[in-house]
Structure formats: C-alpha cells, structure tokens
Amino acid sequence: MKISVFGVGYVGLVTGVCFAEMGNDVICADIDAKRIARLKDGISPIYEPGLDDLITSNLKAKRIQFTLDIAHAVRHSDLLFIAVGTPSDVDGSSDLRYVYQVAEDIGKEIDQYKVVINKSTVPIGTQKEVKERIQNAIKKRGLSINFDVVSNPEFLREGTAIEECLKPARVIIGCENEKSAEFMRKLYEPFLKGAPLLLMDPCSSEMTKYAANAMLATKISMMNEFSRVCERVGADIESVRRGIGTDERIGPHFIYAGVGYGGSCFPKDIKSLIHTGGQVGQDLKILKSVDETNQLQRQNFFDKIKSACGNSLRGKKIGLWGVAFKPGTDDIREAPAIYLMRQMLDHGATISIYDPVAEANAKEHFGNDPHLSFYADQYEALQSVDVLVIATEWKSFRNPDFDRMKQLMKSAVICDGRNLYHPADLRDKGFNYLSVGRPAVVVVS
C-alpha cells in the first residue's frame, strides 16, 4: 500500500518505518529540514532500540523516503497519517495547531479519494474537526473530492516501540463507513497475528486512548500514595506490591512505586482529559488527584534527598544516575529527573550525571549549565559525591559494584527513586539507603 506519514517525531517515525518494514511504500514528510536531511542519511533524530537498523535497511530497499515536499506526500499515497505533536497548552488543553495545519495542507493538495488517519493523540471530537478543515480547503479550490477521516490511536511504549508496532496487542480504528474500515483492515492484517482489530466510532476511539493512559497513570499514582503511608507506618511497599499483584483483578503491571510518571504521554494526556471534562461540565476529581499525587511524589522524593544531605544542598555534590523518564529512551519530557535536577540546582547543589543515551537532550534542556557535569561512565559520576540519586532504572544500575561505589563516594548514601536494591543488602554493605515506600536504612558509622 502507498502510505504517507506527516511528522517524523517519535510516533510518526516509528509508525512509518514499521509500515515500510512490512513491504509498504512509505513517505515520511516533515517541515524540519535538519531532521529530514539526517533521516535521508539514515540517522534517526530519536533513540529507540532497533530503529536505526530499520531506517537503514528500508532506505536501502527503497521502501521508505523522507521529504519536505508535503504536496508530493499527499498526492502520492492512498493513506495519509497525521502524526505530529500535540503538546499541552498553558490551560492543560492539547495544542492542535500542527494537526490542523496538516489537515489544511491535505485539503489544498488532495486530488482523489484518500483515507486520512489521525495517529496523533488528540482530544475527543478532533476527527470531526479535521474532516471539516480538509473539506473547507477543498471547497476553496472549487472542487468536490471524496475522502474519509479515521481515528487510529497509538499505544506505543518508548523503549519497546518497534516490537509493539510490528506486533500490536490490539489495533483501535474509529471510522464512519465500511470503505475506510476495509482500507484499515488491509493495512493492519499483516501485523495482527491473532490480536484484535477493534472497530468503533471515531469519538470512542479517541476516548479509548485517553482512558487507557488515565487508567495506567492512576495505578501508578495509587501506588505512590500507598508508598507514603508505608513510610509512615513501617510497611514495605514492595511486599504490598507483590501481595496485590497476584490478584488477577489488579495484576502485576504499573504498580511499582517510584518518583512518579513522566514522558510525552501520561502527563499531557491526563491534563488534556481533565480539560475536556471541564469543557463538557464534568469535574474529573480522580484524575485531578492523579496529577496532584504525581507532583507530590516528586517533591516527596526531593525532600528525601535534602534529608540525606543534612537538610541543606548548598555546596553539596550530587551524583545522578538516569535522566530519561524511563529506560530504553532518550526522552526527557516531563522526566522526574529533570524536576529533581532543577530543584537541586535551585538549592545550591552541583550534579554529576550519567545516562547512557539522554545526555545530549539534558544538556540542551539546561543550556550547558556549569553546575552540571556529564560522564560517559556511571562510576566516574560518583567521584566525591555526597549522595547518589537514582532516577531511571537502566539495567546497568541493577547490579553495580558497591565496593567500588563506596570507595568513590564521599559519603555512602543512596537515594533510590526506583527501588532497585534490597535494603538489607545495602545495610550489610555499609550504605545509608533511602528508597520509596520502604523503611530507611541508616548505618551508624
């Protein structure tokens, strides 16, 4: 099939490359000249395991091309995917200017029947608005061209996006007629391998995306609330997690306490759904609490760091392992580590940082702040630090050389925001160890 994807950000690029991998003829279009130039050379602008190899192989096979020519991308293909960003506006609503711009561009260039697919995460009702904008642009040309607009929300997790795109757990299609539904069935048939393709109306499909992320974020915030109670009463949140995770009604997924959720989806989508609820007269109290709890959890963990440093960070040197919001990605959007770094800097600390892939993004975010030092080795970042803070659960942090760490660090103190270690083991190794929702380990020297 002939497919064009508008937007070479995270969702658009992964989606386009995976469609090409399945043998389709794919054009990925964007207005960012630097990104397109790099992609033509086989260089991905984002980190995602396996993505570079797929870009290279599909370029070589001439199944994918990257272009700035929006008109060519519209006219060439039968399926047009809108996969541009929808960042949060100041009031929590989704900024849809990029989605609407692509819709209008399509309306200016469309020349025959095509299916336009919303892949971007968009508020409920956006399919209808996109359809109207395309139709209005066609009318301004004095033409009458038939087309359909379909909602096809993405459920990709950064770090495992390639596998999940090629082998989805389910595909959600919001469409208005059988003609567009048949196009989508034909497109996704090679991907399904027994997984369901669920057809529904466009509004329901848009709501499904938000409802899924809201449910997952709620589980995380619930566990983080439980963790704060555990700390006060002497319970261990890890024991609680194992206890409730065996209940099939709850399950073991997304019930890990930590420093809160981050990334490009959960924070933005929760705020957007709260805003949508307000627009239709529904005060979404639970989701407001989910968002509030997420912010509170970050502050609560920062208070642990201050406590570990004698309640003052001025003049302290902090080691930080992990900047990305989760392992397997270089994405720092809404990352808990970014919040913690800003707080530590504001309180007078210097920070020595290691992250295997997110260093460049962190440097850009903080404008090469002189109080930040980045290291290519996780142990080098520990030289003479007063405390080590763990904010991302990269695999190399799970079983480190504690003896080497203790020799390098000024003080044997770890604030673990991901509960990577057993408190008893850290006590035996002579570390003061503060984690989330578990009794603190304090070693008297």
Image (cartoon, rainbow, N blue to C red):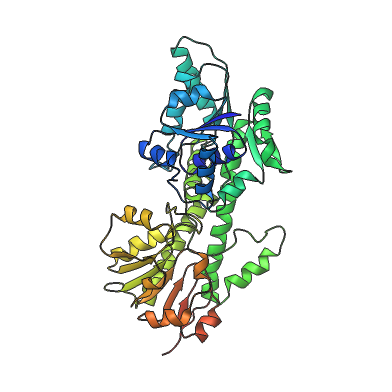
Does residue 304 appear in this view? no
Give the residue furthest to the top: 142
The residue depicted at 42 percent of the width and 69 percent of the height is: 378
Q: Position of residue 309 (x, y in %)?
A: 35, 76
Q: Hey, which quadrant is residue 425 in on the image?
A: bottom right
Nearer to us in this view, 14 or 108: 14
408 with respect to 238 (left or right): left
Residue projecting furthest to the right: 194
Residue 424 seen from this side = yes
- Which quadrant would the C terminus be assigned to in this image? bottom left
Q: Which residue occupies 50% across, 59% down? A: 327
Give the vertical position of 61 relative to 358 (above or below): above
Q: Residue 361's spot in the image, x, y percent?
A: 37, 53
User: At which x and y percent is residue 244?
Assistant: 67, 65
Residue appearing at x 44%, y 26% in the figure: 70
Tell me where residue 328 appears, x and y as whole percent.
51, 57
Tell which of 125 and 423 is nearer to you.
Answer: 423
The mark total stands at 0
Q: Is residue 132 above or below residue 89?
A: above
For the N terminus, which image quadrant? top right
Residue 282, above or below 409 = above
The extreme front residue here reads 60
Farthest bottom residue in view: 445
- Taking the spot 45% from the left edge, 28% from the top edge, the residue there is 102
